[in-house]
Image: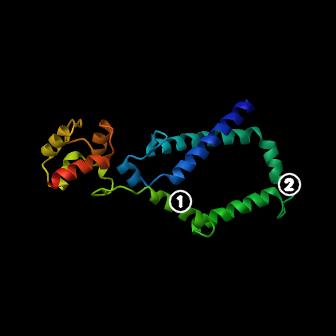
Amino acid sequence: MRKYVSLFLFWSLIAMLVTGVVLFIMPHGRVAYWTGWTLLGFDKDQWQSLHLVFGILMLIFGFWHLYLNWRPFVRYLQEKLSITSPAAITTLISLILLVMAVKYIPPINYLLEFQEKIKNSWVKSSTPPPVPHAELMPLRDIAMRLGMRPRDAVELLRKQGLEVPSGQITLKEVAKLNGKRPSEVYQILIQAAQK
């Protein structure tokens, strides 16, 4: 049983490491959704799902590992408590890191600022969304914002070779149906509205 617990814990750790790095560098939600951002074929929601699932697995097998190794763990805690004991050192370092992260204290704030620079570096959309999370708006609402009748917007997109079942579906759904990004579909509509 210990082998299974250790191996599941190991694979969960690897998955958490990979997904954690991806979540660290992925663009903010508004950019990821608008541009249809993916990495290795997975979108923002899929990376978050992987991180959550393997995080839960890591918790389960971490506690199981603790259960299987309870006696040594208790001995670690019962060692003569001094400033140099492993229990004291690890507790102190963990508390310091917690305070530094919450209070945004150097050098943790440098890491968080670096993350923000990476996330913002993805913003390259030449056509910004009209409102936050515009990709979730029905096509008819997008059309009306552009001064178009919804049925004209649907017809325009169909003439461009896009599959559009109705004006009731979201910009994101239109994009997904046609292998495009929401920003690309919106750009087609903008160009038509400007004529």
The residue located at (53%, 59%) in the rendering is: 115
Q: Is residue 39 above or below residue 121?
A: above
Left or right, residue 140 beside residue 51: left
Judging depth in this view, the residue of 63 and 43 nearest the camera is 43
2 or 1: mark nearer the eye: 1
- Element assignment for label 2: loop
User: Within 10 Å of the Cα at label 1, are there few (<14), some (14-19), or many (20+) other Cα atoms?
Assistant: some
Q: Is residue 112 visible?
A: yes
Left or right, residue 106 beside residue 172: right
Q: Is residue 141 visible?
A: no
Left or right, residue 24 beside residue 107: left
- Look at mark 1 in the image and give the residue it sits on: 115
Q: Position of residue 9 (x, y in %)?
A: 67, 39
The C terminus is located in which quarter? Answer: bottom left
The residue located at (58%, 69%) in the rendering is: 103
- Look at mark 2 in the image and give the residue it sits on: 79
- Element assignment for label 1: helix
The answer for how far apart the CA atoms under marks 2 and 1 are is 39 Å
Callout 2 amino acid: Glu
Q: Specify the quadrant of the image occupied by residue 86.
A: bottom right
Please say if the residues under marks 2 and 1 sit with CB atoms less than 8 Å apart: no
